[in-house]
Image (cartoon, rainbow, N blue to C red):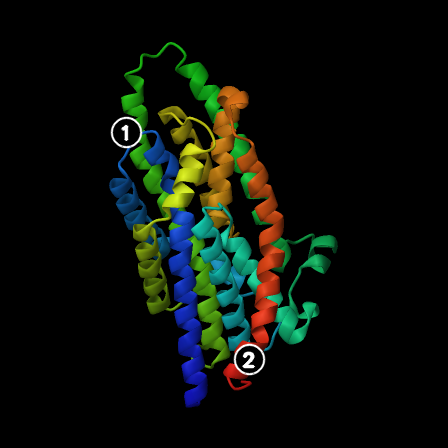
Amino acid sequence: MTAEIYILLVVVVAAALLFALTNGLHDASSIVATFIACGAASPGQAVVLAAVFGFSGAMLGGSSVANTFTNVVSVSMSNSLLTIILAAVLAAVAWNLITWYFGVPSSSTHALVGGIIGAVWASNGFHQVLWGWSQLFGETHELTGMMRIFAALLISPPLGFILAYLLQKLLSLALRNARNTVNRWLKGLQWVMAAVLAFSFGANDTQKIMGLITLALIASGNLQQQAVPLWVRLSGALVMFCGTVLGGWSIMRTLGERIFDIRPIHSLNSQVSSGAAILMATYLGAPVSTTHVMASSILGAGAGDEHRMVNWNIGKEMIVAWFVTIPSAALVAALIYYPVYWLAGKP
């Protein structure tokens, strides 16, 4: 490996870890928003809990999501793939920082997917993206490539909404004659569920960047098989930990205060439903948007209680972000691919 390629690889890894940091800033804030809003924990307590268990999820969550991300392009495993990954990650970082600054609950996963599509499009054309159309509509009806990712991103928010709605109805019925002191127990249970939710976040979100770093290592000839090295897993977990500790307070306010007046029962139900949806997706190797699943679960809990009190504009903003993020990130990645390609010395 030449010195130029080595430097390019270092830059790719650094950019990927920067994305993990913005991912922690952006998405981790959503998993503690209701936890803080209902008074179950202080902001400091909630963020530390999320950081510790998110780190644990990243270390112990397996590699199924990472493997999904390494199988979405058919570009040859050569040095040119490094520029594609770099452009994709830089586009996702830019989108994360913009939406984090304005407190918009958009998806880091959507941004990364859009970045990959745009960078591959600019370098080799759309046909080099493994869309998975033929497998889905063929004899096997198998979800692979981008179709697998799109399906997970599309199904997980409604799943979170439905689960939270049903849980809210059931728990409200079960506790209809309970005294106000039950809130103390509901707040206590949230510490357990917040830990589970943070673990699921670390397990799913960190794997995406692990998969891209692994792909970069294979493309540069530094790795012979598709397996996430320990140092990649550890560095991704540590950077995500740091991003979580720094927190995304504007997004916390959006999810914790702007949707409706969240009480302990709403927070618990949203935590249970979103945690279940994300853990299921991680087990199936499907990358999902923590922010969108959590926001949908909050909306579901509110709808299950009193739908007229819910600020449905947040749901509309989320739907708009769903459709805008991927093409926007793709366009940004396509625009910055050529400068990256030239600066990298046309590898």
- If the image is split into quadrants, where does the C terminus sit? bottom right
Q: Which residue is mark 2?
A: 341
* Pair 1/2: label in front: 2
Quarter of the rendering containing residue 213:
bottom left
Q: Is residue 173 above or below residue 122?
A: above
Q: Amino acid at mark 1?
A: Gly
Q: How many marks?
A: 2
Taking the spot 64% from the left edge, 66% from the top edge, the residue there is 129
Q: Are marks 1 and 2 in contact (CB under 8 Å)?
A: no
Mark 1 neighbour density, 10 Å: few (under 14) some (14–19) many (20 or more)? some
Q: Earlier in the sequence, mark 1 or mark 2?
A: 1
Residue 173 location, x and y as percent? 45, 15
Q: Which residue is mark 1?
A: 188
Q: Secondary structure at mark 2?
A: helix
Residue 92 in percent (x, y) is at 50, 61
Residue 85 lies, with reference to residue 105, above or below; the image says below
Residue 337 vertical placement versus 176 (above, below): below
Secondary structure under tag 1 reads helix
Residue at screen point 42% across, 75% down: 11
Q: Position of residue 3 (x, y in %)?
A: 41, 89
User: At which x and y percent is residue 189?
Assistant: 31, 30
Residue positioned most to the front:
102
Quick check: can you spot residue 78? no
Name the residue rendered at 30%, 51% in the picture.
245
In this view, the residue farthest toward the top is 177
Label 2: how many residues lie within 10 Å, few (<14), some (14-19) or many (20+)? some
